[in-house]
Amino acid sequence: MSQSAPLPDDPPSPPQFRARGALLRRLADVVCLPSSRVNAFERSVTADLLIEMLRDASPEERMRVSRRLAGLAEVPAQLARLLLRDEPQVARPLLEDCESLSDAELLDCTRTAGSEHRLMIAGRKGLSEVVVEALVAAGEMRVLEVVLANGDARIGYAALEALVAMSRDAPQLATALLRRPELRPAQAYVLFWWADPEARRTILQRFAVSREILQDAAGDIFPMAAQEGWQDPMSRKALQFIERRQRNRAAIEKSPFTSLEAAVSAAQHGMTREVAEEISYLAGLKPMTGAKLFTDPGGEPLAILCKATGLPRAALRALWRGLRRPETDEAGAVNPAFERTMLIFDTLAVDRAQTVLRYWNWSLSSAMTPELLRAIRDGDDSAIDEYSLPQRAAMLAFAKELGGN
């Protein structure tokens, strides 16, 4: 039976030229010769000729050349650029096995190639801060997860800030971020607001640090500031963060309550806005900070508030009841959220609870300005680098409450 002719619209098979394959191998061999055998100019000219042939070569031929070059201590830049921008299977040998690729080559590939290329770059050993920043800027979740899992990747401050912000809408990033040695307390305290219970426990265990060394270092500054009448707002804010006393003694004189305990007792019968504001003032907090603590669905911030201000366990239970939160479930078992809140209270030291509470108060209220509030409501974080550290923290923590993206 005779063989049927190909249909007219079938693409013709490319011709197979043995000489082409042999020449590609020989040119790649010359490029791979040590510097003792070929000088830089000869290598460059050979690379130029190889590039021209590779433009019309098959994917299999380009892949073979890529594999051949992956072990080189120095791949000609123009040749690396061509192959790194090629199909993922062609670029793979270089991206996964070539240790000599420069940051410039990796950055070019990150910005001009596809998602599969960025995924391979994310898993490379010794990934630099500038390359990580470019990968983070692409905002691809699979890539971000691989970067965070890459123990050899170095994550710079700007990329870390961006990842913390992204974790607000991608909870899976929060747990990975907490494993990174680069994460700092300021970032962890912000991440806390949208972290799950287990991540919150980790944050408090790892980042709720003592201020003892700061108190020792600044002990003689307090009387100096008092003699100046606390007129310098910059030093006043810093010393308020450092000092040992959490409660606001001056607020007692203006409060309808005789003490913080009395205000909490009143809240037990139903938390009102007025009582919440009084508790905030008496605890040394701004009302905006207090509102954030009282409306948090998890309840852990209530434990931090009570521990930091020296309130007893019964006061925490009173606040829980005042906020109309159940202590038990329908079966009569202890409400898991209430149990977690009590556990935080029992295990967290006073000084460490104060550190967390004061950072929140510093970032969530004292940094607020009309311009920052407007930026949060508009979801405008384009100029985030212009804001201070506590202002950036406030932007992240209040974005959803105030209508930002």
Image (spheres, helix red, strand yellow):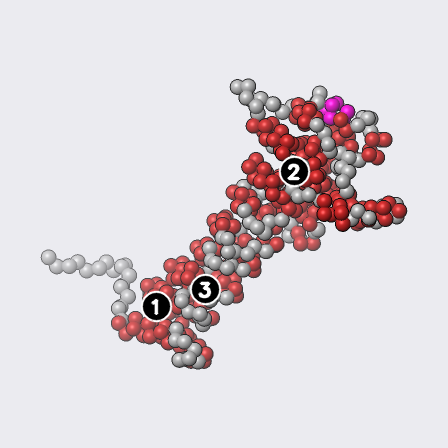
User: Considering depth in this image, is 49 or 151 the residue closer to the camera?
Assistant: 151
> Which stretch appears magenta?
262-267
Q: Position of residue 257 (x, y in %)?
A: 81, 26
Residue at label 3? 99
**Residue at image mark 1:** 57
Helix, strand or loop for disc 1: loop
Which residue is pictured at 47% across the width and 49% down the height? 142
**Where is residue 68, by image quadrant?**
bottom left
Q: Amino acid at mark 2?
A: Glu
Residue 238 shows up from this direction:
no
Categorize mark 3 by other alpha carbons within 10 Å: few (<14), some (14-19), many (20+).
Answer: some
The amino acid type of the residue labelled 1 equals Ala
Q: Are marks 1 and 2 in contact (CB under 8 Å)?
A: no
Q: Quadrant of residue 91?
A: bottom left
- Relative depth, front residue between 175 and 66: 175
Asked if the stretch drawn in magenta spans residue 184, the answer is: no
Image point (65%, 42%), residue name: 208
